[in-house]
Image (cartoon, helix red, strand yellow):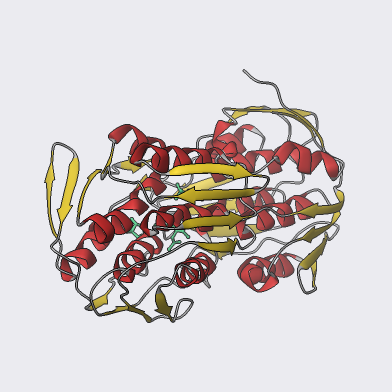
Amino acid sequence: MRIKGGKPLFGEVAISGAKNAVLPILAASLMSTGECRIKDVPRLTDVQMMIEVLITLGAQVSWEGESLIVDASAVEIREVSADLMRRMRASNLVLGPLLSRFRKVRISHPGGCSIGSRPMDLHLKGLQKMGARYQERHGFFEVETERLQGTEIHLDFPSVGATENLMMAASLAEGTTIIRNAAKEPEIVDLQNFLNAMGARVRGAGLDIIRIDGVERLGGCAHQLIPDRIEAGTFMVAATITGGDVTLTNVIPEHLEPVTAKLRETGAQVIEEDDRIRVIAPRRCQAVDIKTLPYPGFPTDMQAQMMALMAVSEGTSVISETIFENRFKHVDELRRMGANIRLEGRVGIVKGVPGLSGAVVECTDLRAGAALVLAGLAAENGTTVEKIFHVDRGYDRLVEKLSGLGARITREEG
Ligand SMILES: CC(=O)N[C@H]1[C@@H](OP(=O)(O)OP(=O)(O)OC[C@H]2O[C@@H](n3ccc(=O)[nH]c3=O)[C@H](O)[C@@H]2O)O[C@H](CO)[C@@H](O)[C@@H]1O
Ligand SMILES: C=C(OP(=O)(O)O)C(=O)O
């Protein structure tokens, strides 16, 4: 991606459906014996990969405009290969659905990814409490059960993935499951709504305790995805870092509160309407401290983008990453562009500089890539962002959307 920075962004941009909602929802569709129609699905490589997982398992999946139609009635295979698992972390979300529907699953160990290790002990501990047995062999988890039984599960940490896997598994279990210390992210609420539309009985998503009354079968449904709060947050930072004035449409402002609060602290004006947010940038932002936390805390998926903003803000910012142990890979690349950042373990100390200078930089992961694009939009001269495929995992038509706001950005296939 080539960016000629230094131009404020102006105008309106429509936010796509949420990546982190559609991936668990596609996994959940494996439990249905009817046809599921999911609307407003973003065109992302992660979505394409999840479609491949579903097809490999035997589901029929087709696009109809912006909707995906999934028919999993003929699914029989119960194994996810190491290859698919390596290519997309979220493929671990088929564990709960396949186990509850077929009672036996073989899923490759997720290992780690560039932002840190991605353990599944909480997912497995919860399933074990529901009566599943598992063993780890040759890099695979082999999990089986006669039928999952409802139970009470207390999560040691409000893990998003574990909450999702357990909610899905419990939907076809016998009896009632209570998940305590559950994750409260908006994507959990969207999953609850999708499960209930298929005929499940889930209540409490968005709160600490989720109650699932198991049912015998799940049928077809139609579901509209929530907008992507991380894509939205990224555009809010794009407006701020370039000194622009941008209105986002198709957003749920409440989901963005942690980001909005921080941006307001930097001096940006954020005006919320029903399903729109307008961001008006200050002359120069003030540095603010950031600590990533489970929702409604500040999202880890916005940490890199905020670091790019802090790199050009006035003052010193302390950024603590508490969710992933290795989510600072963008630091070296931002330094190439003139950022003054020191790392101390999981804390980044960012001393704002008056401006960044364009350079050739490389994406190391999805949000690191987004941060570099943002830095490029703010920098003087040209920036080349390489390995942009990381960004395609989570941003739908990013170049088109940024160009629509006046950014000078092009893309070349390497
Ligand atoms: C709480 C949180 O912010 N979760 C983020 C996490 O979700 P994701 O579902 O990938 O990760 P979790 O929420 O499960 O994991 C968060 C933390 O819990 C630990 N853990 C997780 C599962 C487990 O069985 N054992 C265990 O120890 C992880 O190592 C990590 O430190 O990454 C996604 C992609 O960046 C984000 O959208 C989610 O917001
Ligand atoms: C890292 C992310 O996704 P995943 O958990 O699917 O790797 C993300 O959405 O920022």
Q: Quadrant of the C terminus?
A: top right
Q: Quadrant of the N terminus?
A: top right
Can residue 226 be seen here? The reply is yes
* Residue located at (47% from left, 66% from top): 191
Q: Nearer the viewer, residue 190 or 103?
A: 103
Can residue 313 be seen here? The reply is no
Residue 50 image-quadrant placement: top left
Q: Position of residue 210 (x, y in %)?
A: 38, 79
Q: Is residue 304 above or below residue 189?
A: above
Q: Nearer the viewer, residue 240 or 216?
A: 216
Tell which residue pokes out farthest to the top in this image. Answer: 414
* Residue located at (65% from left, 67% from top): 256
Residue 259 image-quadrant placement: bottom right
* Residue located at (74% from left, 61% from top): 250
The reply, left or right, for residue 165 in relation to residue 242 is left
Q: Position of residue 398 (x, y in %)?
A: 70, 41
Q: Position of residue 126 (x, y in %)?
A: 23, 67
The reply, left or right, for residue 316 in relation to residue 330 is right
Q: Position of residue 386 (x, y in %)?
A: 60, 26
* Residue located at (62% from left, 57% from top): 228
> How many marks overall?
0
Residue 160 image-quadrant placement: bottom left
Looking at the rendering, the quadrant in which ligand 1 lies is bottom left
